[in-house]
Amino acid sequence: MSPREYRSDKRRAAAEETRRRILDAARALLAGDAPPRLSVDAVAKAADVSRQSVYNAFGSKSGLLEALFDALADRAGMGLSDAFAAPDAASALTGFAETFCGFWASDRPVLRRLRGMAVLDRDLELLLRRRDEMRRTALTELLRRLAETPDDATVDVIWQLTSFETYDALAARDQARTTDDLARIIGAAATAVHRAGPSAPRS
């Protein structure tokens, strides 16, 4: 390895470490007891880096928020491969519910705060809307495997059933329920909606 390549590798490693520290600091602010302030300045201070370092790593506050959601998803081990490989609707929709219930449970206080803050933060509201639409797109593709043309009403209802708000409300109602319990409940409800919908296969 040439000296130039070695220096380049060290710079990349340092940049990645700074990026990780900033994301960890943003998550810690949201998970803490004090009311969170997810400004670039607050995150930079918590990470013990300069404001410019945050912009260098993420480009903007929106870029930081996007990366934070990606990091939360990675931390939860999100993946829909099992749902898309499932042999039938019940298994597929239960797998879809399991994936998102696992994500919602992985950092529930942080996700709740992010959604609460979005009421007053336009950037965060737009980000959450895009993320929710990504879930809807994935659900539409999954339902397309199970029926030729999934109707909008069926997609909308199952999309709402698999939302953070539904998970959070059910988890708060009975704290003895595990994440697996909630995934089964939501998966069964989603399957019932799919079976009742106009696009469901008819015998």
Image (cartoon, rainbow, N blue to C red):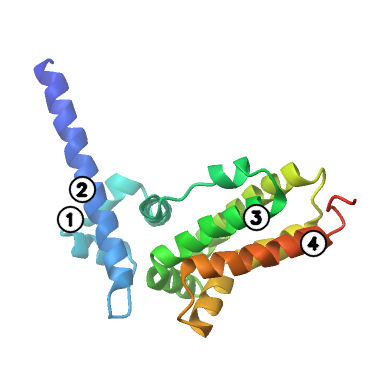
Sequence-first tag of 2 and 3: 2
- The CA span between labels 2 and 3 is 39 Å
- Mark 4 residue type: Ala
Between 101 and 89, the one nearer to me in the picture: 89
- Residue 82 screen position, x and y as percent: 55, 45
Label 3 vs label 1, nearer the camera: 3
- Mark 1 residue type: Val
Q: Name the residue under label 3.
A: 93
Q: Residues within 10 Å of mark 4 (few under 14, many from 20)?
A: some
The quadrant of the picture occupied by the N terminus is top left
Location of residue 163 (image quadrant): bottom right
Could you tell me how many numbered marks the image carries?
Answer: 4
Query: Disc 4, disc 1: CB below 8 Å?
Result: no
Sequence-first tag of 2 and 1: 2
Label 2 vs label 3, nearer the camera: 3
| Residue located 54% across and 70% down the image | 182
| Numbered label attached to residue 18 | 2
Between 151 and 88, the one nearer to me in the picture: 88
At numbered mark 3, what does the secondary structure look like: helix, strand or loop?
Answer: helix
| Residue located 79% across and 50% down the image | 150
| Residue located 13% across and 20% down the image | 4
Sequence-first tag of 2 and 4: 2
| Numbered label attached to residue 153 | 4
Sequence-first tag of 4 and 1: 1
Q: Is residue 113 visible?
A: yes
Q: How crowded is mark 2: few (under 14 residues within 10 Å), some or many (20 or more)?
A: some
At numbered mark 4, what does the secondary structure look like: helix, strand or loop?
Answer: helix
Query: Disc 2, disc 1: CB below 8 Å?
Result: yes
Toward the bottom, the furthest residue is 173
- Residue 33 screen position, x and y as percent: 28, 80
Q: Name the residue under label 1.
A: 49
